[in-house]
Image: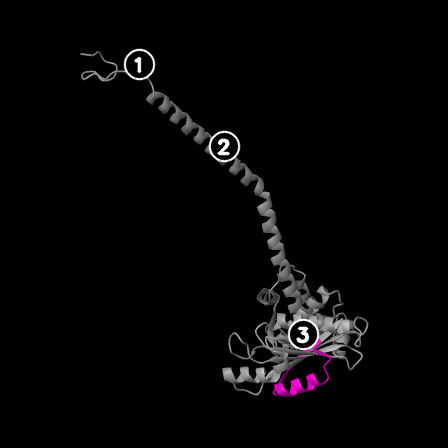
Amino acid sequence: MATTHIKRSNGASRLVNYAEKRAVLKDGYNLDIDYAKSELKQVLEIYGNKGSTQAYTSRVAFSPKEFDPKNVKDQIKALEIAKEIYSTAYPNQQVAMYVHNDTNSLHVHAVIGAIDLQTGKKMHGNWQQYREKLVKITDKVVERHGLEVTIPKHKPEKRSMAEIKMKDRGQVTWKDKIRQAVDTIMREAHISDFKSFKDKLEELSVNVIERGRDLTYGLTGTNYKTRGAKLGDDYKKETIFNELDRRHELQVETSRQRQGRTWLEGRGERLEQEQRARQNLTKRAEDLQRRALESTKHSIQPSHQRPQKSKERGLGGPSL
């Protein structure tokens, strides 16, 4: 099992100094690890990108049940996995990685350069999405290496005392109406993107907007609004987006398989067409050979057997 996190930093050299002192192994991606500080600084200067953020600090930690911090082979494996994670998540950025074994959990510190080497710009966008993307990539990579994927603890739906009393009286609260609408939409397996999810909810008189780290739901025509986290884990942005992404990937894979089956099913017909085409070509070649042979026979026929030309009647006429 591996856990990961990421956050901004305004001091790349400071991060490298801390990580390098305690490192038992180190490696770099898009940089020479022995010159990490100078190369990170050099890229910032080359692109002239101003701003307080110089780098991002991240860490991948492994379970003591799977990796022994003092085992050299485990240290090498941890560094290999970390490099695969960060090169996948940040293919166009500098990454310096350092293995630490000073706790019960073997872990790898990463210093990620702020600049995208392809565009010359810094990472911009939704910070929560960056974190979620890194978590997804980490889960996929560790699973490929035979490690357990981190399963977050599920939090039950949050209900106020007023909601509890209304439920006891058999009344449906406005939050329950939102929950029921979301549950109804998420039962439709073909819904695989946020726009479709949002449009379908509007048909059930519920509006939803993406706001920072969470989703905000509201009943149409009222002032009743709530964040997904207050409804329960099943209604949070991370849960909804992860499920929609999973469905989208499944649909893409299903489409590929369907195209493959269609190609295979049409293979027999294509073979028949090719066979007919070859037969037609063979027949045409035989016809051409026969005509050529007949022409050759005619050209070598004795002169006294050939029909004579007549000035008056043409071929076969009497000689004058």
Residue range of the region highlighted in magenta in the rendering: 4-25
Mark toward the start of the polypeptide (3 vs 2): 3
Q: State left or right for residue 31 relative to residue 285.
A: right
* Residue placed under numbered mark 2 in the picture: 279
Question: For numbered disc 3, what is the local secondary structure?
Answer: helix
Using the rendered image of the protein, determine whether residue 145 is visible from the camera's viewpoint.
yes
Mark toward the start of the polypeptide (3 vs 1): 3
Q: Residue at x 64, y 61 (%)?
A: 247
Q: Position of residue 320 (x, y in %)?
A: 17, 12
Q: Which residue is at the front of the view, 12 or 250?
A: 12
* Residue placed under numbered mark 3 in the picture: 228
Q: Residues within 10 Å of mark 1 (few under 14, many from 20)?
A: few
* Residue placed under numbered mark 1 in the picture: 305
Q: Residues within 10 Å of mark 2 (few under 14, many from 20)?
A: few
Using the rendered image of the protein, determine whether residue 155 is visible from the camera's viewpoint.
no
Q: Position of residue 191 (x, y in %)?
A: 62, 61
Mark toward the start of the polypeptide (1 vs 2): 2
Q: Nearer the viewer, mark 3 or mark 1?
A: 1
Is 153 included in the stretch rendered in magenta? Answer: no
Question: For numbered disc 2, what is the local secondary structure?
Answer: helix
The amino acid type found where label 3 is placed reads Gly
Q: Which residue is at the front of the view, 277 or 241?
A: 277
Work out how far the residue at label 1 is from the one at label 2, CA to CA, in angstroms. 38 Å
The amino acid type found where label 2 is placed reads Gln
- Is 55 rendered above or below residue 257? below
